[in-house]
Amino acid sequence: MPLGGCGEFGRNLTVYEAEGKLLCVDCGGQIPDDEAPGVDLFIPDFAWLAARAGDVVGWILTHAHEDHIAALPHALAVAPAPVYARPLTLALLRESVDQSQLRPFVPGTTRQLGPFSVEALEVAHSIPDACAVVIGAAGRRIVHTGDLKLDQAVTRPTDLGRLRALGDEGVDLLVADSTNATRPGRSGSETDVARALVAELERARGRIAFTFFSSSIQRIGTVFDACARVGRKVCVEGRGLREMIAAALTVGALRPAADLLVDADTAATLPPSRVALLLTGSQGEPRAALGRVASGEHPYLSLGRGDTLVLSSRPVPGNERAVARVVDRILALGVRVLDAPALHASGHAAQDELRELMDLVRPRTLLPIHGARRQLFAHADLAEAAGVPSFVLVDGDVLELDERGARLLDERVPAGRVSLEGTQMGDVDGETLRARRRLAWEGVAFVADVGGRMRVTTMGVAAENVLPALIAAAEAAAEAARKDPGSVDVATAVRRAVARAFLAARGKKPRVIALV
Ligand SMILES: [Zn+2]
């Protein structure tokens, strides 16, 4: 049962049931887009799991990306059970999850969780310590890939030998990453990216800045090593990067040379050719380190003529404009901006790799996960061409597996998204968001009766030179309504009059609220 991640990106959560027990794989958040301004994060709806809390035998986290772990603390509050994950993931959870719940999950080993046998399998992804999960229960075998790519040039590549052996033994269902199912070819190699990053670092004369996803530990390690070699200090700016690096240091995934890292105020005093900056904000976030450098608002760091910025990540779909805005600002400062395809590689298998994966595993059935419908259907098309039947599900659908094969049940489990905003969970509904978007487009005008005189206050409305006309309209409408109590009430009359006055003056009206 996918409770998140099927039909849209993020919020990944898949639940497996056998003999009345539940095994949960991943528990991610979803970063809100422009449609949900103000919401901090969306998480899966845990109501169904809460009702079955006593049946949950464990949580397995395939890797430490936010779209796979961010919702876990909230899930554990309603369905507590041991959490199995690899060291980097455990290190990142230590702050938010009760340590006594955390258990190591070691590739090549199998453990029994209730009726489920669960094996961790090494996979390559854009963050270290990623794994796939091999689940056995009721005589059936499932391979759940998590996020993966088949890049074999990395230190710990995807365990193709084990995948092939599983294929020989027989796999009933392959539950696989669809993120890049629309992209032809292969996802590109981290080793080639490392080579390109080092080449730019060696070529650069002035300051050089890098931006990538905080979880690009391998690229961070590459920059650390190369900087130590060419005699540049490294300054890391931005909370996401600092937290990820701290976690990577504790598990030994990064080993920078002694004295390599410097603070921003020290970096500002070093000659440009002696420093490299690692900045958050690869997705164009204006408040992140790169965004602040771009707008000249960073207290210590700046970039200018003679400096270089290396963009080592692609914009996530939907973020293209935000990234373009920041890049334009940086270019206006005279900075050389490098964004060649060689400087980034996706962490997700593209079409050739997905075909190879199906050839290795030879599943009886494919279940595409991790994607909007476009990606899920593209993955299903690849499966069809390979002669593998597949099911495209949406969150809440239930796929049943028995000796005859897989079939979609009529029943569904409740699945949806729940907002996190400030300290509150689930209180921002569709209606609230519609109102927010409307206000963003229209602005708002308040009309109040203060001590017998009308006052008009606007937010987000260009109303400066129409204010006297608005106030006059409000006063006239209030007076008329008071004289004729049989017609509309005063507040409604004032609201309508002010809206009409706006239309007459500007050809457009904001949302008007009358407190009279
Ligand atoms: Zn991932």
Image (tube, rainbow, N blue to C red):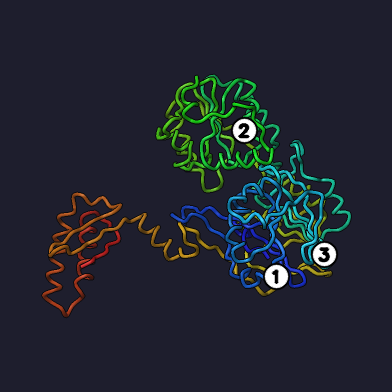
Q: CA distance from mark 2 to mark 3?
A: 42 Å
Say if residue 106 shows up in the picture. Answer: yes
In terms of depth relative to the viewer, which is nearer, 265 or 395?
A: 265
Q: Is residue 376 left or right of residue 262?
A: right
Would the CB of label 2 be found within 8 Å of ligand 1?
no
Separation of residues labelled 1 and 2 (CA atoms)? 46 Å
Q: Residue furthest right?
A: 168
Secondary structure state at the residue bearing disc 3: strand
Residue 297 is situated, as x and y percent measured from the top left of the image, at 40, 35
Mark earlier in primary sequence (1, 2): 1
Q: Nearer the viewer, residue 515 or 323?
A: 515
Q: Residue at x 85, y 54 (%)?
A: 167
Residue 57 in the image: state x and y as whole percent.
72, 65
Residue at image point 13% right, 74% down = 482
52 with respect to 289 (left or right): right
Give the structural element (helix, strand or loop) at label 1: helix
Labels 1 and 3: the sequence-earlier one: 1
Q: Locate the N terminus by quadrant.
A: bottom right
Asked which quadrant contains residue 197, the reply is top right
How packed mark 2 is, by other alpha carbons closer than 10 Å (few <14, some 14-19, many 20 or more), is many
> Which label sits in the foreground, 1 or 2?
1
Extreme bottom residue here?
Answer: 486
Amino acid type of the residue tagged 2 in the rendering = Leu
Q: What residue does disc 2 label?
A: 343
Residue where numbered disc 1 is placed: 55
Find out whether the residues at labels 1 and 2 contact each other: C-beta distance under 8 Å.
no
Crowd class of label 3 (few under 14; some 14 to 19; many from 20; radius 10 Å): some
Q: Quadrant of the C terminus?
A: bottom left
Identify which amino acid the numbered label 1 is placed on: Asp
Identify the mark at residue 140; answer none if there is no mark.
3
* Quadrant assignment, res 70: bottom right
